[in-house]
Amino acid sequence: MENHFYVLHDFMVYTKGAAYYLMGLMLLGILGFWLYITGRDEDKDIQ
Amino acid sequence: MSTDNPAVKKSLYTPFNIMVGLIFLVGAVITALRFTKGLGAVTNLSDNNPWGIWISFDLLCGVALAAGGYTTSAACYVFGLKRYHSAVRPAILTAFLGYSLVGFALLYDVGRPWRLPYPFIVQSGPSSVLFEVGLCVMLYLNVLFIEWSPAALEWLGVKWQGLKKVRTVIVKMTLGLTIFGVILSTMHQSSLGALYLIAPSKLHPLWYSSYLPVYFFVSSIAAGLSMVIFEGTLSHHYLHDKMDATYLSEHDGVTMGFAKGAALVLAGYFLIKVVGITMDNNWHYLATKWGAWFLVELLGFVALPCFLYAMAVREKNLLMARVASVITVLGIVLNRFNVSLVAFNWQLAPADRYFPSWMEIAISLYIVTLGVSIFWFISSRMPIFYEHPQFKEHETAEFHEHKLKKHPQSFGH
């Protein structure tokens, strides 16, 4: 749902706040992705 | 040399050659029309849409897909990943041809092409993003030519001994050229995205972002890595007899290494696209038809190949990496089309929207065919997929040490 902002400050506080939460999730996601992608290094030969 | 051999005559009239000949013929006719009758005779360009498919495909896609040159040479010479050395020459050749054809396509697209050098000799306009793009592309084209020239000099040096000394000087410049090439690529790949920052009211909010230069640069790295895998797969199939043992033995490692790099870059690209939506608070647009199209691009052509690359690396599955490379290349093409054509002027009435004429599409096809033909001509004659036997001793001591560890049999041990 679209939010209504009457001043730029409100908009910045809202979007930056959301971005900070997102960054935290992304850091965890990237860590998981890295572990997934390197999890089997040197385990198997190329098919 | 006699050409009466019937086998030689027969080989010239293959279905592939006939198709290429037809494309060249149609291209020549449209070229004559373009330069005698003007842009209006062959294009659907208008004041609303002065940049059409020749900019979207030939320039934006051409530059992005030629990024394999700087990514591969940076991986090998700057980051010291010598196990990718055999992929450098094919990547440099692809990039050199890609950028050459970008310049060639601009001759068609620019209304008065003889004025292309004006920014450098008449009026520079250094505050213009387009000037920076033009300067970087011009300089990088020269860098790529010099980086590619050792292959041509080795080919010619068999007859003319003096060229060997020129080649030796150029090989010593490799690291400097690579660093200069990376700097120029960083600048103009991002600046191509920055060109669209001037049109926030014309580009749909889901594609418009102040991060557009970052998007273009990061996606160009994924495009370059994917193009090396894609082009390597095609070359492996069609130019297998031109490859030496070193190239063949390193090929699978190059594919897996670049697949891992592409997976990580695509993951980063996906995340910064999501950050862009968050920072502009554009989530509500995702529920519209434009949002559905945006999600097709983001999920189908960024997240999906990222996941496929990751699976391919984890499972050591070469086929999956190759499939992911094709999807990524298509995704980059789709993204550049979306930014410069589909989502551009999105608020105009359908009658005012741009769709390329068949002649514009034919010229783009002609330019791609020209590039593929030149690639085949060069790589089937010059040492692109193999090391020239007379020049192996010119490689650096570090490279020899690496090869000695990896391929002791090639040094007679």
Image (cartoon, rainbow, N blue to C red):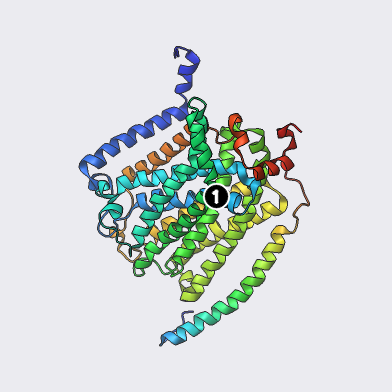
Q: Which of B393 and B179 is in front in this view?
A: B393
* Total marks in image: 1
Element assignment for label 1: helix
Task: Residue at 58% x, 53% y: name it.
Answer: B78
Residue B376 position within the rendered picture, expressed as x and y whole percent measured from the top left: 49, 33
Task: Residue at 29% x, 56% y: name it.
Answer: B50
Sort mark 1 into few (<14), some (14-19) or many (20+) by Cα contacts within 10 Å: some
Q: Identify the residue position indicated by label 1 in the image.
A: B175
The quadrant of the rendering that contains the C terminus of chain B is top right
Task: Residue at 49% x, 60% y: name it.
Answer: B217
The relative height of residue B109 versus residue A15 in the rendered view (above or below) is above
Q: Residue furthest right?
A: A43
Q: Nearer the viewer, residue B396 or B289?
A: B396
Query: Does the rendering let one see residue B308?
Result: no
Residue B320 position within the rendered picture, expressed as x and y whole percent measured from the top left: 64, 48
What is the three-letter code of the residue carrying label 1?
Leu
**Chain under label 1?**
B
The quadrant of the rendering that contains the N terminus of chain B is top left
Q: Nearer the viewer, residue B374 or B352?
A: B374
Task: Residue at 25% x, 58% y: name it.
Answer: B47
The relative height of residue B98 versus residue B52 in the rendered view (above or below) is above
Query: Does the rendering let one see residue B284?
Result: yes
Residue B109 position within the rendered picture, expressed as x and y whole percent measured from the top left: 30, 48
Residue B158 position within the rendered picture, expressed as x and y whole percent measured from the top left: 52, 26
The relative height of residue B345 versus residue B66 in the rendered view (above or below) is below
